[in-house]
Image (spheres, rainbow, N blue to C red):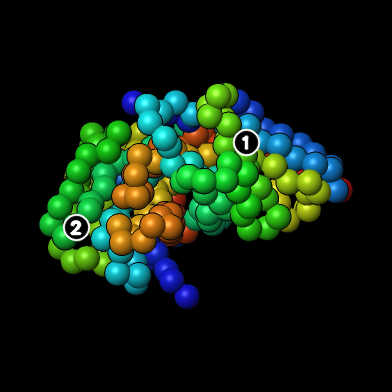
Amino acid sequence: AQSVTQPDIHITVSEGASLELRCNYSYGATPYLFWYVQSPGQGLQLLLKYFSGDTLVQGIKGFEAEFKRSQSSFNLRKPSVHWSDAAEYFCAVGANNAGKSTFGDGTTLTVKP
Amino acid sequence: DVKVTQSSRYLVKRTGEKVFLECVQDMDHENMFWYRQDPGLGLRLIYFSYDVKMKEKGDIPEGYSVSREKKERFSLILESASTNQTSMYLCASSSRRSTNEKLFFGSGTQLSVL
């Protein structure tokens, strides 16, 4: 069965600092990997996704993620965090293009002024 | 602007009531999903549908049922609401036709069962 682990429940960074959110997955084949962001009171919005090809993927809002098969990881990064990035972030793994995804428990990001 | 619309943002119901949560998408998507979101548990899949009149159980279907009579509408039904069904419910849709697959989410329905 597929599963996703986000080891950090809550992360606090200063505005302008770099950010890395961790995601580890368990899946029997080549996974489809996603990062979503949820701002307070909102649904989830896709930041980026990996299906195949280049293992470093660029997303919206200046985010990027790197797929590392050897480590079963898909960590999300941003070089300089903005106050508007404060939100909850979810990593997800999907079996195929049908969209049935398994989500991690989420990481809440707080941004200090 | 593409949309997934959930009929209620907040809902308060009593134990034992029958509850309907409605979701409509305007993107002609084949796939529709119901998730519940609880603090510390992330999103858990309740039911999903790949086509009209088709439904499949997700990871936590107990206490829920669904209806998909039309392609654009996917309803989640709580036959007899219980307090442990107090949660945020998220509807999502996706297309099977696109190779750039992703889920589109509604804004959620916060359900409180008293």
Please provide percent x and percent y for residue B23.
Answer: 32, 61
Q: Is residue B9 visible?
A: yes
Say if residue B19 shows up in the picture: no
Quadrant that contains the N terminus of chain A: top left
Q: Please tell me in which quadrant of the rendered image residue B53 appears.
A: bottom left
Residue that badge 1 annotates: A75
Of residues B76 and A100, the one drawn nearer to the viewer in this rendering: A100
Along the viewing direction, whichever of B75 and A109 lies nearer the viewer: A109
Please give the label number shown on residue A97.
none
Q: Chain of mark 1?
A: A
Q: Is residue A100 left or right of residue A82?
A: left
Q: Please, which residue is most extreme toward the front here? A: A53
Q: How many marks?
A: 2
Query: Which quadrant of the figure has residue B10?
Result: bottom left
Rendered residue at 27%/38% (across/down) = B58
Relative depth, front residue between B80 and B55? B55
Q: Report helix, strand or loop for mark 1.
A: strand
Q: Is A44 located above or below residue A28 in the figure? A: below
Disc 2: which chain? B
Between the residue at mark 1 and the residue at mark 2, the CA separation in whole angstroms equals 34 Å
Pointer 1 local density, CA inside 10 Å: few below 14, some 14–19, many at least 20: some
x%, y% of residue B66? 20, 50
Residue type of the residue flagged with mark 1: Asn
| Circle 2 SS class | loop
The residue wearing badge 2 is B51
Give the image quarter of residue B26: bottom left
Q: Residue at 44%, 42% (x, y): give it.
A: A32
Quick one: which residue is furthest to the bottom in this view? B1
